[in-house]
Each structure stands twice: as structure tokens, then as C-alpha cells.
Image: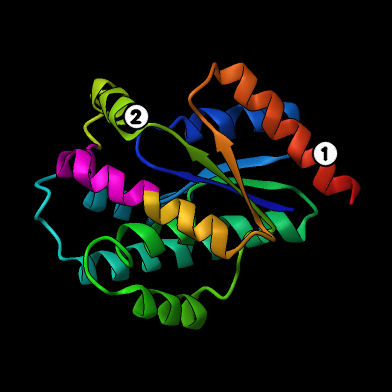
Amino acid sequence: MFITFEGIDGSGKSTQARLLADRLPEALLTREPGGSPGAEEIRRLLLTGDPGRWSAETEILLFTAARRDHLEKTIQPALEAGRTVICDRFADSTRIYQGATRGDLRARVDRLHALMIGREPDLTFVIDMDPAVALDRGLARASGEDRFEAFGLGFQETLRHGFLQLARDTPGRCVVIDGNRDAQAVAEEIAAQLATREGA
């Protein structure tokens, strides 16, 4: 099973991806951009530096290149070996960050995805959270990978609306989870949702 976590910066999706992986000993936990040596190199280019460093079009190409390497080197081999793959972000992030919020580029993102990736998750958890709280949390990490947080609150609010619309458009695979709670409570709901899907 290929499970992804999506949401705005600072929403807690990385924590939830890790907590779910802790519950599933056979699972492979990975992330985007990154998850393979080549993709991790591209990650540094994308997440550091000035907010205006890349155009949205260039970002789409860089994210897709990283995703292709990640798919070839990490995700597909694990799935073929019968492992569950849990990924912190995947193509939905590119659809929203570059496709829906930084110009009318969604159609280009989808075409490039179909051409070069051609794989969707089996299940996506969208962690929904107050953008102001999430932004404060994301900036407080001071990870150095805060290029997208630097676009400000308005950008995060637009992202949130984009993710919620995506979930409405793809109810067969997306489950919206309220992230404005204690991390353990969120994790319990995610585990319950997964058990329901597995039992279906």
C-alpha cells in the first residue's frame, strides 16, 4: 500500500507520517522532495535560498525530476517487495504549491505527472490546520528549509484551500484529518481510518 501525507507547512504531517510508520514495522518511511540520494540533492536546491530563486515552472520541473528518481530508486522497489510505503508529500504538493497557487499551471503539472510519474497513492491523509498556527510552528523549527514559509500567511491560506479542494475532488483516496489537536489524538484517528480502509 502506498500512503501519503499532505498539508500546509507546519501542519504536523511529517510527525504523523512517522507515528504511522512506528505502528507498521514493515513500512518504509520516506519524504519528498527527497527520499533517494539524487532527489535529496534536488531538495536542497528547492527548499533553501531566496523565495524568488525559482519560477513556478522551474520548480515543477525540479520536483518532477526528484520524484522520478525517488519513484525509481525507493518507492517502486519497496512496493514490489511487498512493503507499505509511507511518504511525507508526493505529487499532490506539486499540484497545489505550483499548480494552483503560483499561476494557472495545474494542467501542466498533471500532464507532466502522467508522462513522467504515472503513479498515484492508494491513500492520502490531508492534515488540515489553522494556517497561522502552522506557519508559526514551521518558522519556529528554523530548519533552514523554510523557503516556502517565507512566502507568508496569505500563501499558506491559499495552500490550505487548495488541499481541501483536492480532497473534495478525490474522495476515493483522500481523507481530511483535523490537525488542530494533540498529535496522539490525530495519530489515533489516522490509524482508525487506515484500519477501516484495510478492512473494506
Q: What is the crowding at mark 1: few (fewer than 14 residues within 10 Å), some, or many (at least 20)?
A: few
Q: Residue at x 54, y 32 (%)?
A: 178
Counting residues from the start of the chain, the first of labels 1 and 2 encountered is 2
| Magenta stretch encompasses residue 157 | yes
User: Could you tell me which secondary element the residue under label 2 belongs to?
Assistant: helix
Label 2: how many residues lie within 10 Å, few (<14), some (14-19) or many (20+)? many
| Image spot of residue 182 (x, y percent) | 54, 16
Question: Which residue is label 1 attached to?
Answer: 195
Q: In the figure, is residue 153 to the left or right of 13?
A: left
Numbered circles on residues, count: 2
Queried whether the magenta region covers residue 32, the answer comes back as no
Instruction: Provide residue 116's location: percent of width, then percent of height.
Output: 48, 78
Question: Magenta region, mostly helix, strand or loop?
Answer: helix
The amino acid type, in three-letter code, at marker 2 is Ala
In the image, what residue occupies the spot 30% across and 28% down? 138
Q: Over which residues does the magenta segment extend?
A: 146-160
| Near-viewer residue (158 or 7) | 158
Tell me the SS state at disc 1.
Answer: helix
Of all residues shown, which one is farthest toward the right?
Answer: 199
| C-alpha separation, residue under disc 1 versus residue under disc 2 | 28 Å
Residue 104 locus on image (x, y percent): 26, 74
Which mark, by number, is residue 134?
Answer: 2
In the depicted structure, whether residue 141 falls above or below residue 130? above
